[in-house]
Image (cartoon, rainbow, N blue to C red):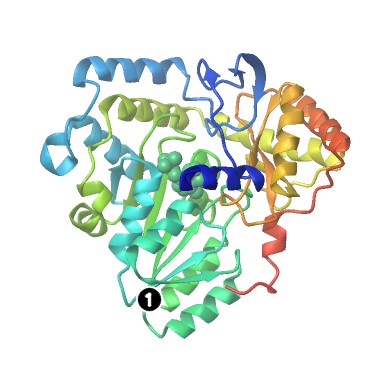
Amino acid sequence: MTDVAERLQELRQTGLHRRLRLVAGPQGPSVQLDGRLVLLLCSNNYLGLADHPQVRAAAAEAAMRWGAGAGASRLISGNMEPHRRLEERLAAFKGYQAALLFGSGYLANIGAISALAERGSVVFSDELNHASIVDGCRLSRAETFVYRHRDVEHLAWGLTQAEGRGALIVTDGVFSMDGDVAPLEALAELASRHDCRLMVDEAHATGALGPGGRGSVAAAGLGEEVDLVVGTLGKALGSYGAYVCASRELSEYLVNTARPFIFSTAPPPPALAAALAALELLESGPQRVERLRANGATLRRALAVEGLDSGGSECQIVPVEVGDADRAMEFCERLLERGVFAQGIRPPSVPEGSSRLRFTVMANHRTAELRRAAKLAGAAARELGVVATGSAARRYASPALAA
Ligand SMILES: Cc1ncc(COP(=O)(O)O)c(C=O)c1O
């Protein structure tokens, strides 16, 4: 047996083996999954824009006008009109001087963090931050102080210990696996007090929170207190790619130092044109954001009726934690058998012992569909004897955990 085969076997034995499922057709509220029609409750196409006719048309037109790819990195010959146009619009939407596009949210996070923190400095990172933030911290070679989830006192203590070496506080705006929101006002206050930059990842907040879907920073009434806002084009904006909003100076600095920006091909024009069309639809149709919020609340309420706890969720991400990885996957399969697809989430995406079914709703789900899904989830949970253990969000708010 090869070392790889052994490792795969180990993953199977511990319930952590993953396999790809195949979706036919666009990411609508229902999809054909492995040949069966199911209600889709795990797509990040939150506003239903990935398959919107205007978004598709924009991508197709851009492909005809500018071609399928950018052909080079931005700093070689890949900087094209669609890049500049989208950056200007994103900066205006978020209320920042500048926006800089990256290939993906993963690349934006590792690029920005490793550019802003260096060996000898300290990055402060919430323990439930997305993997791309964790990897950015590792790449930076800075010391990383992992503070307990949303625990501002723990962070304040860490900042004091760092004695001026703090380079960056970094947090998800909306936590991707729990759907709860970072305490941004308090983080901004601490960043200012300790002369440390603050970076907020709005991957799941853009299009979902704040006035007109401007995100968690806008929802908290903050702006320039947050030095960098990262967003992705691959979720509510229905396309692919990402951006970092910042001051002109910081943006220029990232152009010169963020390695995934420098050493990777520029995002392709069709993806950018699609994102721009989606942004225009978001700006002209804020009712989609309201609908998304209402749908999140509907699902949470309907799950609660079934005795399923969605923890600290405040938005379109609605987890039902069950603990064990195998049970989470079994829960997923039983629900799939009933025609509802919500993915089981296991380590390393979530901490050990906090595996869950993670529902994500879309603005174009119907209320009746969400109520039906919750009923079916309740039936599957009862069949399995799954008792929700309470959300990671709540458990991790306890000060009992060490960093
Ligand atoms: C909080 C967060 N940040 C960043 C990313 C990565 O974004 P992308 O999919 O554009 O690489 C994700 C993706 O799931 C995420 O949840």
Crowdedness near tag 1: few (<14), some (14–19) or many (≥20) residues, C-alpha within 10 Å:
some
Please give the count of numbered marks on the rendered protein. 1
Q: Residue furthest front?
A: 1
Does residue 370 appear anywhere in the picture?
no
Q: Where does the image place residue 240, in percent across and percent down from the top left? A: 38, 33
Is residue 124 positioned above or below 215 on the image?
below
The residue at label 1 has a CB less than 8 Å from ligand 1: no
Does residue 249 appear anywhere in the picture?
yes
Q: Where does the image place residue 310, in percent across and percent down from the top left? A: 74, 46
Is residue 229 positioned above or below 168 on the image?
above
The quarter holding residue 308 reads top right
Q: Where does the image place residue 245, in percent across and percent down from the top left? A: 34, 50
Which quadrant is home to the C terminus?
bottom right
Identify which residue is drawn at 47% across, 19% down.
52
Please name the amino acid that badge 1 sits on.
Answer: Asp
Q: In screen coordinates, is 2 left or right of 314?
A: left
The quarter holding residue 135 reads bottom left
Identify which residue is drawn at 58% across, 43% down.
9
Badge 1 element: loop
Q: Which residue is mark 1?
A: 195
Identify which residue is drawn at 43% across, 52% down.
132
Q: In screen coordinates, is 159 left or right of 365?
A: left
Is residue 36 positioned above or below 379 on the image?
above
Identify which residue is drawn at 70% across, 38% down.
329
Foreground of the two, 301 or 332: 332
Foreground of the two, 6 or 29: 6
Foreground of the two, 266 or 89: 266
Q: Where does the image place residue 41, in percent across and percent down from the top left? A: 64, 30
